[in-house]
Amino acid sequence: MSLLFRWTFCLLICSVAPIVAAARPNILLVLADDLGYSDLGCYGSEIATPHLDALAAGGLRFTQFYNTGRCWPTRGSLLTGYYAQQIRRDQVPGVPSGSRGTRPAWAPLLPALLQPAGYRSYHSGKWHIDSMPIACGFDRSYCLKDQGRFFNPLVHYEDDVKLPAVPKGTSFYGTTAIADHAIASLQQHAKEHPDAPFFQYLAFTAPHFPLHALPEDIAKYRDRYRSGWEQIRAERFAKQQQLGFPAVALSDVERTLGPPYPFPKAMETLGDGEVNLPLAWEALNDEQRAFQANKMEVHAAMIDRIDQELGRVLDQIRSMDAFEETLILFLSDNGASAEIMVRADGHDPQADPGSADSYLCLGPGWSTVSNTPFRRHKTWVHEGGIATPLIVHWPEGGIADRGTLRHTPGHVIDVAATLLELAEVEPSPTSRDSATPSPPGKSLLPLFSQDQSLDRECLWWSHEGNRGLRQGDLKVVAAGKAGAWELYNLADDRSEQHDLADRQPADLKRLVALWESKNREFSKTARQPQ
């Protein structure tokens, strides 16, 4: 147990009264960081995720759910129900926006909206939104702002108050500390607020780089990845088909596409074992193959640990007799990352992979595997960058055909609308004026009973010049500000292998015009006064 939270557990370790069933469901919203579409066992992976697999078996898996392609826009959209550009949490020309942008007053976060319905709200983990959690309506928070150190964070907060830095050499590990805080918050909730529903936002920082994992977790995957990324990707693709995922083609590996940002000095620091392209495994030398296999062992260990710690949180909810009436959602903020860099405390080439003195990134070879069967990676808005697993579990929620798949497209903007409908509260403050836009998200509740279309005009993406829009089964997408628009029919080409731009110019023109119209609309919204 983390020393930082020992005092909390000492206060709460006494017997905890069960929660009295509430009319409104409890909510556990779990967000992973840089987890790829195929990184869970129930989405095709070889990684051990038994608790998540069990949630999927007792609930639903969505096959066409989307994020924004990057961490901070996704988090802003997830907790408000707006596109990130609308609320200044992604770049809008001429407006203070992006990762440092401040939301307008008319876009509060979910805790402020849930509070009138009697919810107590708790945040544990990564933040990456403007302001701070307690200031935004959470009742308790552990905010881990140091993304670069899983074993010794320098910047973290409890209830918006900065905590001392954690020195190297302690038992602290970020994923465990985040779960510790969630458990402590839920114990306190059960003791002090047994009649109130809870909203627990559990935001793991894993498996985001640096690849830091506990030795015992890494040991589980020793030598598992020596067969190489082509073999592991083929195994994942085959498993997806066995699990009943929609039949799609396995996308071609883009051998000349590397990280989205160049860090040549990092390549020097990391040494001859690192490669910044998804080259054929057989083209690598022995040192490179060993280095790359070691990296994936650590990535797998980080995901394994997420599942273990989530299991402890689920056990806490069960101990409160609250599991049956708790809605659980699990998803990722973007696709797996092709980035390669060295930050924080740097990288010691002599350190054990995954230890505090190492600084490794997954890179494009393994990111291509994690995003199976799709193209590209985090920051791009091709399917590999924006497709997320979504697991929904709610025993008392009337979910039909448990253990099955839902294929209706959805987006992180839909989560707030879903939770607010469940809580029986308005999706935005009743005091908002007529100039305030309605949130674009749609409630997912109809999909809990059966797969059916949601009445929406389109889904829209924009990040660092990467652009995309989906209307029905047609999607236009472009890579970078100078990139040409591509057109795909995702009904039979979800892996984006056959560009229809030249064959269907009318559709291309229509969808590009709609993207531009939405871009103007959202930019205008961002420029509105507070």
Image (cartoon, grey):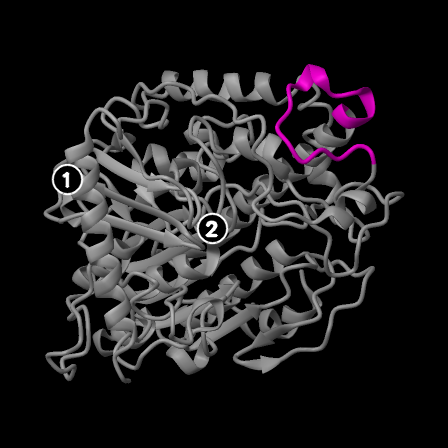
- In the rendered image, residue 279, in percent from the top left (x then y), is placed at 64, 24
Does any portion of residue 441 appear in the rendered image? no
Percent across and percent down for residue 132 are: 48, 77
Examine the rendering and report whether any part of residue 391 can be seen: yes
Query: Which class describes the residues within 10 Å of circle 2: few (<14), some (14-19), or many (20+)?
Result: some
* Magenta segment main secondary structure: loop
Residue that appears at 37% across and 39% down? 484
Q: Which residue is mark 1?
A: 449
Judged by depth in the image, the label closer to the viewer, 1 or 2, is 1
Judge whether 366 appears above or below 521 on screen: above
- Reply above or below: 267 against 19: above
Whether residue 277 is in magenta: the answer is yes
426 displayed left or right of 365: left
Residue 14 vertical placement versus 286 (above, below): below
At 70% across and 59% down in the image, what residue appears?
149
Sequence-wise, the earlier of marks 1 and 2 is: 2
Query: In the rendering, at what x and y percent does residue 386 appear?
Result: 39, 43
- The one nearer the camera, 458 or 27, is 458
Q: Say which element carries label 1.
A: helix
Q: Residue 42: within the magenta? A: no
Decide: few, some or many residues near mark 1? Use Cα within 10 Å; few <14, some 14-19, many ≥20.
some
Counting from the top left corner in percent of width and height, residue 339 is at 61, 45
Given the image, on which type of amino acid does mark 2 rest?
Asp
Residue at numbered disc 2: 315
User: In the rendered view of the protein, which quadrant contains the N terminus?
Assistant: bottom right
Between residues 148 and 89, which one lies in front from this camera angle?
Answer: 89
> Is residue 397 placed above or below 252 in the rendered structure?
below
Q: Which residues are magenta?
A: 272-289
